[in-house]
Amino acid sequence: MSYIQIKNIWKSYGDNVVLERLNKNVEQGEFVTLVGASGCGKTTFLKMLLGVEIPSKGSIKLEGQPLKAEPDGERGIVFQRYSVFPHLTVRENVLVGLELQQSRWLGRLFGGAKAKALLQVDAMLDRVGLTPAAQRYPHELSGGMQQRLALAQALVAKPKVLLLDEPFGALDPGIRADMHTLVRELWQQENLTVFMITHDLSEAFALGSRLWVFDKVRHDPQAPNAYGASITYDLPIHKDNHADLAQQLDPELTTVRKLA
Ligand SMILES: Nc1ncnc2c1ncn2[C@@H]1O[C@H](COP(=O)(O)OP(=O)(O)OP(=O)(O)O)[C@@H](O)[C@H]1O
C-alpha cells in the first residue's frame, strides 16, 4: 500500500471544473515538484492535501486512512507570501505552530508543557539558523529569514508531509540557493514527504525526486471552465537527467515560462 493514495480526484467551484481525474500514488520520502500554467489548480490540489479544501469527487488517503477534513500536525504548509503574526516575535511565532497542534481548544500551552514546547522551538530555530533573531518581530526580518521562520513554524510540530506553495518565489537567487540547501537537508533528515509548487523548472529539477506537470487535456473553446487540469507528465528526476527532462517538457516549459 502506498503512503499517499490519490484516487480519481475532481475539484469544481460551481461550474468551474478546476481539476479532474487525478490518480497517483506517492511513497514516503518522495519530493514531488508541481509545475503548470498559472490558475490550473496547483494550489487547490495542495489545499486538498492539507485538508482545507474537500475534493468534489474521489479520495485522498494517507497511510490507508482518509485525510481528516481539517489540517492537523501530520501536514505543514509554507506559502510564498509569508503570513505570520506580526505582533509576535520569531520565537513566539514558532511556538504558535506547536500550541495550535498540542492545545487545540485552548490554543495556548502553560507551565511544564510550555517549557517543553519552548525547548522544541529553540531546537527548530537553531536548525533553520534563526537563533540570533529569536526575539525579533517579522517586519525586522529579511525575506529569506521570513521564509526560514515559515519553515520553522511548519516543521516544529514534526509533520510527516510538508507542502510548499512557491516558497522561494519572492527571494533573490543567492538566498534561494541557501533555502534549497536547507530544504534538502530537512527533507532528508526528517524523512519528509514533500509536495512543492514552483514556476521555476530548474528549481523543480534541483530539489525534486519526481515532477508532475498539471495541464488540461480537454478543451472546449465555448465553455473554458468545463474541463479541469490533470497530471499530464509524471517523471522521475535524477541528478543526471535534467537536460532530457527539459527537452521532453518543452511545450510545458514554454507555457510555464510565459505565465510565470
Ligand atoms: N475558493 C475558491 N472559490 C472559487 N474558485 C476558486 C477558489 N480557489 C481557487 N479557485 C479557482 O480555481 C482555479 C485554480 O486556482 P489555483 O490557485 O489552484 O491555481 P494555481 O495553479 O495554483 O495558480 P498559480 O500558479 O497562479 O498560483 C482558478 O480558476 C481559481 O480562480
Image: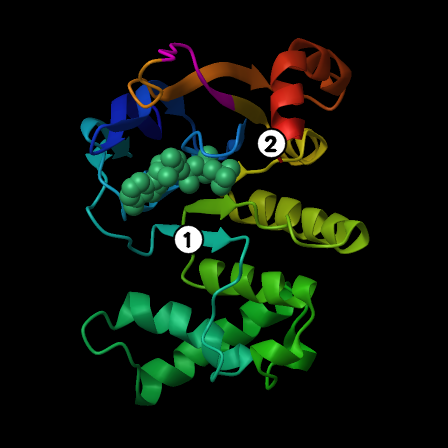
Kindly report the distance in space between the C-alpha atoms of the residues bearing marks 2 and 1: 27 Å
Residue flagged by tag 2: what amino acid is it? Leu
Is ligand 1 within 8 Å of the beta carbon of the residue shown at mark 2? Answer: yes
Q: Is residue 147 magenta?
A: no
Whole-percent x and y of residue 171?
Answer: 70, 54
Please report the bounds of the magenta region as a residue range: 213-221
Whole-percent x and y of residue 165?
Answer: 50, 45
Tell me the residue that label 2 is attached to. Answer: 259
Helix or strand or loop: what does disc 2 sit on?
A: helix
The answer to whether 119 is drawn above or below residue 38 in the figure is below
Q: Residue at x 66, y 9 (%)?
A: 248
Q: Residue at x 64, y 50 (%)?
A: 168
* Left or right of 53, for residue 165: right
Q: Of discs 2 and 1, which sits in the foreground?
A: 2
Quadrant including the N terminus: top left
Decide which of tag 2 and tag 1 comes sooner along the chain.
Answer: 1
Q: Residue at x 41, y 53 (%)?
A: 76
Whole-percent x and y of residue 178?
Answer: 75, 53
Q: Is residue 218 magenta?
A: yes
**Residue placed farthest to the bottom in the image?**
111
Helix or strand or loop: what does disc 1 sit on?
A: strand
* Left or right of 36, for residue 254: right
Ligand 1 rendered quadrant: top left
Q: Which mark is residue 76?
A: 1
* Left or right of 25, for residue 209: right
Q: Residue at x 34, y 50 (%)?
A: 74
Residue 1, visible in the rendered structure: no
Which of 75/122 is in front?
75
**Residue placed farthest to the front in the image?**
222
Whole-percent x and y of residue 197?
Answer: 53, 38
Is ligand 1 within 8 Å of the beta carbon of the residue shown at mark 1? Answer: no
